[in-house]
Each structure stands twice: as C-alpha cells, then as structure tokens.
Image (cartoon, rainbow, N blue to C red):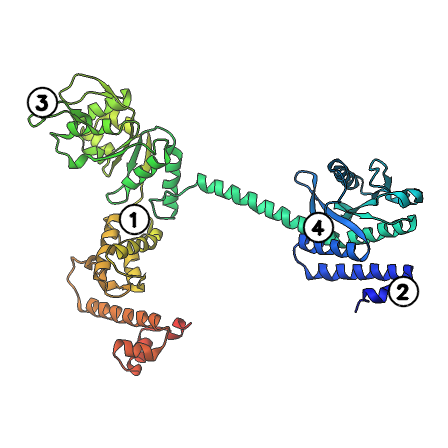
C-alpha cells in the first residue's frame, strides 16, 4: 500500500521526494492499464501531480497530423495571472519542442522570452528561480522517435537541483503516457478515416440510387436504376419499353422526380384508352366551337404540363395524323389547339412508353419512322418479372403489408409452400399480376399467414388446360398436408404435443406424418 501523506511528512526531504515520485509513477501505470478516455485519465493524473509534487497547471498537447498543429487534449487549469499573449508563448514553445524533439524551460514565466534547452538547465541562475513567479517546463511526448505531443507544467522550485528533478519526473511521465497517446492518435485517425469513408459511400449511394417508388435489388433492376440516374437530370426524350404490368409508369415518375422539373406538373395520358376522335383534343386542347360539343375552350395535356413532364403511355397506339403533330411539338415545341389558328409554345419533357414493337409498326406503316427516331433517343428497358425472380419475395412482402393495412388485417408472413408457388410461376402479367394475387390472398387469409390455397388456381396448376390426373390430386393433397404440418411446427416451435392439439390429431399420428414427409421437427425448436 502506498504511504500516506502523514507518513511522508516524517521522512527526510530527499527520501520523501523519491517516494512521492514513485507513488505518482505507480498511479500513472495503474491508471493507464485500466484504460479509459485519455482526456479523463490525464485530467486526473495532472491533478494528482499538482497535489503531490506541486507541479501545477499541467497541460497535454497532442499533434494533429492532419493539420500539423498542436491541440490541447487535457489541462488542469489555465495559469492564473498570466496574460493571453504569454500563454500563447507557451503554445509556441510546445510547437518548437515537437519540431526539435528536445525539452525547453522558461526559468521565470514573468520573463517568457528567456528560454533554455532541457540539457542546459544547470546553467539557470538560482537567483532567477528564487525571485521568479515560477518556471515553465515542456517536454516531448515521443514513442520510437516519433513526436506525438508535449507535456508541460509550471514548477515553483527555488533551486536548480529541484528544478532538474521536476524535469526528470516530467520526462518519465511523458514516456509512460506516450503509448496511450499513440493509441488515442490512431483511434482518432481511424475515426476520421471511417467518417470520410462513410461520406464517400453516402455520395456513392446518391450516385447509384434506387428510386423510392420502385422495389427490387436484382442486377437487371440495377441497370434500370442506373439508366434513370443517367438521363434524369437532362431534358432528353425517354422511351420506356417493356411488357404490360412491369411498372413503366413508375420509371417515368422516377425520371421526373429526379429531374430539375420535379416540382412542376407530371401529366399522364394513356394513348390506347382514348378514342381516335378525341385524342388530338386531349393532347393539344380545342377552341370553342371546334366540333360538336365543344362549348368552351379547353387546354390540352401539353399545355397543362408546361415546364413539367408529360408521360405518353402506349404511344404506339396513336393515330398517324396525331403522330405528325406530336413530332412537331417534339422538334419545334409548338402546336395549335384543335379548331384554332394561334400557335402556342410549351416547354415540356416527353417520356413515352410502349409494350409493342415499334420497329414492326414502322415496317407495317402504323408508326412514323421519323417520330420513332425522335422518341427513341434514350431507351430504357424494364425487365419482365420472370427475368428478376430474386425480387419476387421483396415485392410480395411489400404488397402483403400494403393490403394488410388497407383491409385491416395483421398478416405477418407467407408460408413456405406459397413462396414456392410464387417462385415457380412464370408471371405473364408481371408485377401487376403479382399485386392482384397478393391482394386476393390477403382478403382470403383468416390467420396471420398467407397459405398456398389462398393463391389463385393458376399458380397451383401451371398446366390448367390439361385434364387433372389422380396422381396430381394426391400430390396436391400431400402438399397441403405437409404445409399444414410445417406451419404448425413453426407456430409451436417444434412442440409435437402442441402441434397435435392444434391440428386435432393424436401425437402418434403427427409423428407418423412428420416421418412420412421427412420433416425434422427439431429444426423448429429455439
């Protein structure tokens, strides 16, 4: 046990000093071994040095290698009675100690310009110490010839011998804390590195974004996202191609939201849903009296979309006469309303979509070749659902959550058998068909699970046009029975007795069925 202050008071002064130093060094070693934040550790140690040895105003400065400047890491207290410019002088001395790697001493802080090197401390006039306000000592904190910072104190020693003892003790302490300072420096540099890496990755994520209105992480969808990112910031005309139900409108909306026109109108029009007689009026508007029933002037979709984006879905269904006017508005940015003579101008970005082969339409004379090339500036192909099967479960979970909330249900998962059916189906109707199937299953579900029998018959019998054979009926029954068993085992965490009660069977029958279907009940236990 270290001696108490009362014990030290009865010892001769030199011996007392040695024991005090040993006590300080022992406490430093123990504290550093216990670990903790360097700032907290050093604040306590500097206070103990002040109380036991009488070295006051201890300050630990650490070299920040990023900016090549010293920064105060721990300080007992700012020296009282010292002007700001004089304390700044201490900082300059610390910077010089780091540069040269040699201790420096101000014998009298009242005369800060008088500085000696640590090796020349014996040349200090003892009368300066006796009459001065205190001496400033600053030593380097170094490890394997690498200067990490400085440790400084103010000593009130009145003799050169005692000042040398203070400098020697301060040097030993600096050597002891060098390892902790090095670890702290590495930790801070690692934190800075990880922060910069995080910022870089965040920036990379912004560049390789996924639109918030689209779901899927497959490689083919990543290509779609990249295409959206490339074209969104421009005013280039975009042609979105893909089968019906793949989500072409979502791509168009993502392009608009990512573009500088995001705050402006986004006008959608389905060209296939408009009768040929009114398609021009819908697109370009009409004047009063232009045709029977035109009782007032009406703005068209292009006027409504001014400074924004217009989305022409199923653009291949437009009549040839309307195609000519669309080509003019794409090239000249001008048009006339039906029945009008005034030429109007509009600033609209056009995004078109089709599930047809426009190349075949051009060969057949159903689509203008010049309009095709004007629309097909930047094509974006949206893959069919069968080409992105890894996204099916993610889409299904999204629709389950969506329609559970809409229908006031609490469906938590999709059973294994239902997942197998979703993954093996070829999805001719793409995402729209998947959404309809999940909505139907959500309505039929009476528990918190969607089972295979909740899905449409087309998913349960891929070849529904063929006559049902007896072997297929048995296979379907066995599949349903196995699904019941697996689902009950999941619910009751592999407890066979609980499963038997749940299914209304004996435990022996449940055991036979589990063995028959090769189910490992132990795998369901926690």
Indicate which disc, 3 or 4, sits on the residue closer to the N terminus. Answer: 4
- Label 3 or label 2, whichever lies nearer to me, is 2
Q: Is 22 on the left-hand or right-hand side of 122? A: left
Q: In this image, 238 relative to 343: left or right?
A: right
| Quadrant position of the N terminus in the picture | bottom right
Determine whether label 2 and label 4 are within 8 Å by CB: no
Q: Quadrant of residue 501?
A: bottom left
Q: Residue at x 74, y 51 (%)?
A: 178
Residue 289, numbered label: 3
| Residue 13 x %, y % | 90, 60
- Marks 2 and 4, the one that precedes in the sequence: 2
Determine the CA span between mark 1 and mark 4. Answer: 56 Å
Tell me the CA gap for discs 2 and 1: 90 Å
Which residue, given by chain and number where applicable, does mark 2 sit on?
A: 11
- If you read the primary sequence from the N terminus, does the residue marked by circle 2 or circle 1 appear first? 2
Work out whether mark 3 precedes mark 1 in sequence or the reverse, and give the earlier one. 3
In this rendering, would 237 be left or right of 11? Answer: left
Residue 61: x and y in percent read: 72, 45
State the mark number for residue 182. 4
C-alpha span from label 2 to label 4: 38 Å
Please say if the residues under marks 3 and 4 sit with CB atoms less than 8 Å apart. Answer: no
């Amino acid at each position: 046990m270290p001696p108490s202050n009362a014990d030290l008071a009865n010892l001769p002064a030199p011996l007392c000093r040695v024991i005090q130093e040993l006590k300080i060094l022992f406490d430093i070693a123990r504290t550093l071994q216990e670990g903790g934040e360097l700032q907290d550790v050093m604040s306590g140690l500097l206070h103990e040095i002040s109380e036991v040895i009488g070295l006051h105003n201890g300050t630990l400065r650490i070299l920040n290698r990023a900016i090549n400047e010293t920064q105060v890491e721990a300080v007992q207290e700012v020296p009282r009675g010292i002007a700001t410019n004089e304390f700044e002088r201490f900082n300059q001395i610390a910077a010089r100690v780091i540069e040269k790697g040699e201790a420096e001493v101000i014998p009298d802080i009242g005369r800060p310009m008088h500085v000696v090197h640590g090796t020349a401390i014996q040349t200090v006039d003892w009368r300066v110490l006796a009459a001065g306000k205190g001496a400033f000592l600053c030593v380097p904190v170094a490890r394997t010839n690498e200067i990490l910072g400085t440790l400084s104190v103010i000593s009130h020693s009145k003799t050169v011998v005692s000042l040398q003892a203070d400098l020697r003790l301060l040097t030993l302490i600096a050597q002891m804390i060098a390892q902790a300072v090095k670890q702290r420096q590495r930790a801070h540099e690692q934190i800075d590195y990880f922060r910069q890496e995080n910022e870089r990755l965040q920036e990379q994520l912004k560049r390789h974004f996924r639109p918030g209105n689209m779901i899927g992480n497959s490689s083919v969808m990543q290509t779609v996202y990249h295409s959206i990112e490339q074209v969104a910031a421009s005013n280039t005309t975009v042609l979105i191609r893909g089968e019906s139900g793949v989500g072409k409108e979502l791509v168009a909306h993502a392009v608009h939201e990512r573009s500088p026109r995001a705050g402006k109108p986004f006008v959608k029009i389905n060209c296939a849903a408009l009768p040929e007689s009114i398609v021009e009026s819908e697109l370009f508007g009409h004047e009063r009296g232009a045709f029977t029933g035109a009782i007032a002037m009406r703005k068209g979709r292009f006027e409504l979309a001014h400074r924004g984006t217009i989305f022409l879905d199923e653009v291949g269904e437009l009549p040839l006469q309307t195609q000519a006017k669309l080509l003019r508005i794409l090239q000249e940015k001008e048009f006339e309303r039906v029945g009008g003579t005034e030429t109007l101008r509009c600033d609209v970005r056009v995004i078109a979509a089709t599930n047809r082969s426009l190349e075949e339409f051009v060969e057949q004379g159903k689509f203008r070749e010049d309009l095709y090339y004007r629309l097909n500036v930047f094509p974006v192909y949206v893959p069919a659902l069968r080409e992105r099967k890894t996204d099916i479960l993610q889409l299904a979970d999204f629709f389950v959550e969506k329609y559970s909330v809409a229908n006031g249900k609490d469906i938590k998962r999709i059973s294994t058998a239902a997942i197998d059916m979703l993954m093996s189906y070829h999805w001719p109707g793409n995402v729209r068909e998947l959404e309809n199937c999940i909505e139907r299953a959500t309505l039929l579900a009476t528990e918190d699970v969607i089972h295979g029998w909740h899905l449409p018959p087309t998913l349960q019998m891929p070849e529904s046009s063929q006559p049902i054979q007896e072997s297929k009926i048995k296979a379907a029954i066995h599949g349903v029975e196995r699904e019941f068993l697996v689902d009950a085992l999941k619910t009751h965490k592999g407890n066979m007795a609980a499963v038997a009660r749940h299914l209304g069977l004996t435990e022996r029958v449940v055991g036979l069925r589990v063995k028959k279907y090769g189910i490992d009940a132990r795998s369901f236990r926690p």
